[in-house]
Image (cartoon, rainbow, N blue to C red):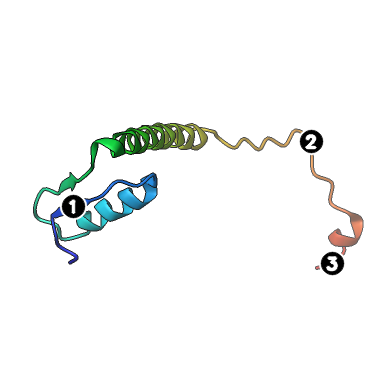
Amino acid sequence: MQHCSHVVTFPSHSYEQLYQGVRRCWRFGQKHPVVVDTVLTEGERKVMINVQRKAKQADEMFTRLVEFMKDSQGIQSVNKITNNIEVPSWIQSIK
């Protein structure tokens, strides 16, 4: 089922489980839009609200991570030697 594009899910509190299940549809070679239907009862509405909160937090965390990585790539390593290097006499005699 590597190329399925329509999936039906049932709510659980695990955002990772939902994310992985949906991502399986977006593998290389997928040629169709991916449709996800979630079947839930009125009592499971709070479960979906919880999963949506976790999804928002994951998106925010990923955005901050990307920004952090951009900042770290902008740091330049500066190696300035201000003193003359003294070579020990025993190294100078080896030739």
The quadrant of the image that shows the C terminus is: bottom right
The quarter in which the N terminus is drawn is bottom left
Answer with left or right where residue 5 lies relative to residue 75: left
Identity of the amino acid at label 3? Ile
Q: Residue type at mark 2?
A: Asn
Please give the label number shown on residue 49: none
Q: Quadrant of residue 21?
A: bottom left
94 w.r.t. 9: above or below? below
Sequence-first tag of 3 and 2? 2
Residue corresponding to mark 2: 83
Q: Is residue 77 left or right of residue 28?
A: right
The reply, left or right, for residue 72 in relation to residue 66 is right
| Amino acid at circle 1 | Val
Q: CA distance from mark 2 to mark 1?
A: 68 Å
Q: Secondary structure at mark 1?
A: strand
Label 3 belongs to which residue?
94
Q: Between label 3 and label 1, give the one nearer the viewer.
A: 1
Q: Which residue is more in the foreground, 94 or 38?
A: 38
Q: Residue shown at 29%/46% (left/top)?
A: 11
Q: Quadrant of residue 88?
A: bottom right
Could you say whether the residue bearing mark 2 is in a helix, strand or loop?
Answer: loop
Q: Which mark is residue 8?
A: 1
Q: Earlier in the sequence, mark 3 or mark 1?
A: 1
Q: Earlier in the sequence, mark 2 or mark 1?
A: 1
Q: Is residue 13 left or right of residue 11?
A: right
Mark 3 → mark 2, Cα distance in angstroms: 24 Å
Q: Residues within 10 Å of mark 1 (few under 14, many from 20)?
A: few
Secondary structure beneath disc 3? loop
User: Decide: marks 2, 1 in contact (CB < 8 A)?
Assistant: no
Residue 8: x and y in percent read: 18, 52
Residue lying at 9% horizontally and 55% vertically, measured from the top left = 31
